[in-house]
Image: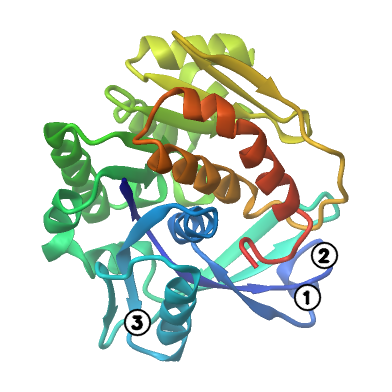
Amino acid sequence: MRTLCLGEAIVDLVCRRPVASLVEADAFAPFFGGASANVAVACARAGGQVALAGGAGADAWGGWLHERLEAAGVDTEWFALVEGLRTPVAFVTVDEHAEPMFTIYGEGIEATIEAVAGRLEEAVDQTDALFIGSNTLVGERERALTLAARERALALGHPIVFDPNFRLHRWSGAGAAAAEARGLLEGCFLVKCNQREAAFITGESDPDAAAAGLLAAGVRHVVITRGAAGAMLRSRGLRRDVRCAPVQAVNTTGAGDAFVGVLLARMGQTDFYPPALAAGLPDAVAAATQAVTRWGAVE
């Protein structure tokens, strides 16, 4: 099964040493970025069939992103390079705890989603599953496109995987982000979130209680990542906990993207057979653990 990832591809310019703020950074190196694009690349590298619906500018950086998508094996049929659009670039710094901070320049996520607006229904129709996040829910137009893609996938009976992956600096507050996320829960095959996101959405600080709340909202399967504690899978027929190996983290930016990309690959390879979630969980945890040891999310 081929999964369609809806979302952004951007260039991450990363300062490869810990700093307290952007003004302390003295040099940056370019890395592939954008949450949905990272997921697509991780999925393809794990052996999955995946396409990315989105866009970038028809400029040097847009060409750079397109080349890397194709080199990774991501289907770019619905990834457009648009004349007059400036490819988004994020300056990324990480603190002493390996937590990132982003300062984004360029046309932004909404413009990159607009690039594929006229072909989005076609993309959903011609693929077999849909992956969405919350980054395309902030602006009015991008939210409408995301919801339309979701409704089309539901009508076709396609599995939907939702990773909130909140970038709270883009929202008016955690409450607004959580409210939008709650509107997408019903009918999802899988919701993957970290422990803090699960608490935002459900109001439950205990991860098992949060998972139960997500299942009660109409989600079939829930995976909650727990940082150094690993990850947990909960559904009405499946339950598994996997711990991760200790590593020295330098940048946590791509951990969740690598994690869900591997799960998408394992599910697609088995026609979204639910036990594949439990079987693939150790591989997903291992991928996320490896991701935090490098400066780039997927390279």
What residue is disc 1 on?
A: 25
Circle 2 residues within 10 Å: few <14, some 14–19, many ≥20: some
Q: Secondary structure at mark 2?
A: loop
Circle 3 residues within 10 Å: few <14, some 14–19, many ≥20: many
First in sequence: mark 2 vs mark 3:
2
Dot 2 and dot 3 residues touching (CB under 8 Å):
no
Q: Secondary structure at mark 3?
A: strand
Dot 2 and dot 1 residues touching (CB under 8 Å):
yes
Identify residue type, mark 2: Val
Identify residue type, mark 1: Ala
Colour logic: rainbow
Q: CA distance from mark 3 to mark 1?
A: 26 Å
Number of marks in the image?
3
Q: Residue at 26%, 82% (x, y): give it.
A: 82
Q: Can you give x and y, in whole percent of width and height, for residue 113 in the image?
A: 28, 63
First in sequence: mark 3 vs mark 1:
1
Q: Can you give x and y, in whole percent of width and height, for residue 80 in the image?
A: 27, 75
What residue is disc 3 on?
A: 57
Q: Quadrant of residue 253?
A: bottom right
Dot 3 and dot 1 residues touching (CB under 8 Å):
no
Q: Residue at 11%, 33% (x, y): give it.
A: 155
Q: Secondary structure at mark 1?
A: loop
Q: Can you give x and y, in whole percent of width and height, for residue 37 in the image?
A: 45, 61
Q: Is residue 5 above or below residue 282?
A: below
State which mark lies toward you, 2 or 3: 3
Q: Residue at 72%, 35% (x, y): give it.
A: 227
Q: Quadrant of residue 15?
A: bottom right
Which quadrant of the figure contains the N terminus?
top left
